[in-house]
């Protein structure tokens, strides 16, 4: 099974793909989709949707998971990320993928064992699970891989010890 994880944003969207083979999770691909920094929101969302559509067409994932929007202090920023998340969900829906959603704390707890883990701690666990390929730059790619891993775990894939 091929699982696509997505870390939504309005300018940078992280994506990560992991393959579940028996009791193993294997790195497939990770990176970011970028929208023009100064473009109006509707053009950024269209660019993200177009690029994600191409990514889904190219890899044909079996399942997808998207991180929920986390509202910190700035409700405008949360609203903007919510718009990006909506564009992402639309693309995944058109591809007929079932989509799971996970709050950031659930992803961190699943991957690092602590819902308040730092990005660095989560990145180290992603690398431990997937090997050095799991260390994506920018961090959005690693975050997306952690979402894919969390979903694979939810689906029942155990994490084997590396070594």
Image (tube, rainbow, N blue to C red):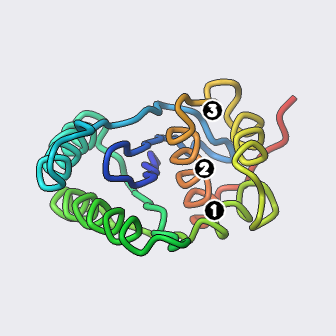
As drawn, the label of residue 146 is 2
Q: Position of residue 54 (x, y in %)?
A: 19, 37
Is 64 positioned to the left or the right of 41 in the image? right
Residue 11 pos. (x, y %): 32, 45
Q: Which of the two labelled residues, at mark 2 and mark 1, occupies the earlier sequence position?
A: 1
Q: Secondary structure at mark 3?
A: helix
Label pair 2/1, CB-CB below 8 angstroms: yes
Looking at the image, residue 119 sits to the left or right of residue 9; the answer is right
Compared with 132, 60 (above or below) is below
In front: 1, or 126? Answer: 126
Residue at 75% x, 49% y is 159
Q: Residue at x 39, y 35 (%)?
A: 32
Residue 70 image point, x, y percent: 52, 70
- Between the residue at mark 2 and the residue at mark 1, the CA separation in whole angstroms equals 7 Å
Label of residue 107 in the image: 1
Q: CA distance from mark 1 to mark 3?
A: 15 Å
Q: Which residue is mark 3?
A: 134
Q: Is residue 84 left or right of residue 136?
A: left
Q: Earlier in the sequence, mark 2 or mark 3?
A: 3
* Residue 98 located left or right of residue 40: right
């Amino acid at each position: 099974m091929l699982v696509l994880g997505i870390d939504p944003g309005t300018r940078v969207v992280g994506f990560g793909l992991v393959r579940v083979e028996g009791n193993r999770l294997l790195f497939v691909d990770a990176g970011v989709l970028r929208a023009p920094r100064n473009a109006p929101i509707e053009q950024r969302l269209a660019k993200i949707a177009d690029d994600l559509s191409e990514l889904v067409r190219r890899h044909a994932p079996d399942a997808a998971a998207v991180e929920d929007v986390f509202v910190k202090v700035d409700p405008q920023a949360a609203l903007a990320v919510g718009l990006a998340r909506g564009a992402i969900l639309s693309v995944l829906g058109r591809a007929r993928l079932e989509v799971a959603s996970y709050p950031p704390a659930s992803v961190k707890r699943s991957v690092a064992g602590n819902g308040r883990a730092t990005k660095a701690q989560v990145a180290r666990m992603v690398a431990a699970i997937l090997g050095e390929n799991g260390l994506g730059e920018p961090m959005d790619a690693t975050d997306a891989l952690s979402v894919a891993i969390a979903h694979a775990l939810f689906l029942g894939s155990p994490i084997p010890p590396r070594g």
